[in-house]
Amino acid sequence: MSKIKTLLIDDEPLSIKHLKTILTKHCEDLDIVGSASHVEEALEKIITLKPELLFLDIELGGESGFEILKRCHSKKFEVIFVTAHNQFGIDAVKNQALDYILKPINKLELLQSVENAVHTIHKKKKSESSSGNEIASQRLSLPTMEGLIFVDLSHITHIESEGRYSRFHLSDNTKHLVSKNLGEYEEELERKGFTRIHHSCIVNLVYIDKYIKGRGGYVVLKNGKSLEVSSRKKDDFLDKLQ
């Protein structure tokens, strides 16, 4: 299994440093991809870094760590709270946190919590992989000038509109011009891990490497291709991306 991408969120630099030191030294299953000190920074890094595990403080310089969870409508990460306050345990449970650790950190307690988190996340990954394999086996028939071409959905990176036609881009860099417009594919593909990011583009979420913010912003695919996100589609797209 690959390492678990981990984000540390705390408004105290010393707390971040102490936690990172322990995790780096003793938890080889974790990959510390970044840290954040306030809500907006944390939300931005959740979108761009796609962490699988959050170590989250509750009081963030007058803001609340719970606000981060509230604004992540489609939460695809696990949470371990690390805080100096013991009165938020019930709220943590309501937010389905894996654990609630009080400062000053007890190293043995922290390591046990990490072990439980690693087990939970790997189990979840295995389940999603099985589901992903099922989706990958699905195929789409594309009506071209030569006839029908059958492609695996997992090989489609994105589809671009060309008037009454659609151009399918595949992971091996081949392209197919299809005699149907983009709208005829949207509903079917939305149920299978794709989303419309612009009136002229549908993208396979699996192939998105990063999102660059802006009025609408744009995404960069794993093959380096950049695609514009329309401002009208932005909020819905970011919900799905998270």
Image (spheres, rainbow, N blue to C red):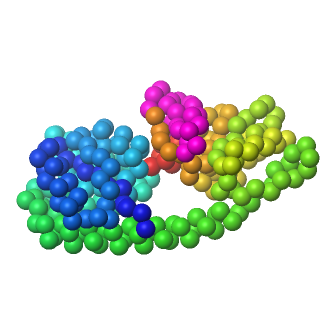
Q: Is residue 62 left or right of residue 189?
A: left
The relative height of residue 186 versus residue 79 in the rendered view (above or below) is above
Quadrant location, the N terminus:
bottom left
- The quarter of the picture where residue 214 lies is top left
- Residue shown at 57% from the left, 48% from the top: 207
Residue 21 at x, y = what percent?
A: 17, 55
Residue 158 at x, y = what percent?
A: 66, 43
Q: Residue furthest top?
A: 215
**Residue 183 visible in image:** no
Span shown in magenta = 213-236
- The quarter of the picture where residue 88 lies is bottom left
The relative height of residue 211 versus residue 127 in the rendered view (above or below) is above
Q: Is residue 187 left or right of residue 228?
A: right
Q: Residue furthest right?
A: 146
- Residue shown at 53% from the left, 37% from the top: 219
Q: Is residue 82 left or right of residue 223?
A: left
- The quarter of the picture where residue 140 lies is bottom right
- Residue shown at 62% from the left, 44% from the top: 203
- Asked if the magenta segment contains residue 123, the reply would be no
**Residue 119 visible in image:** yes
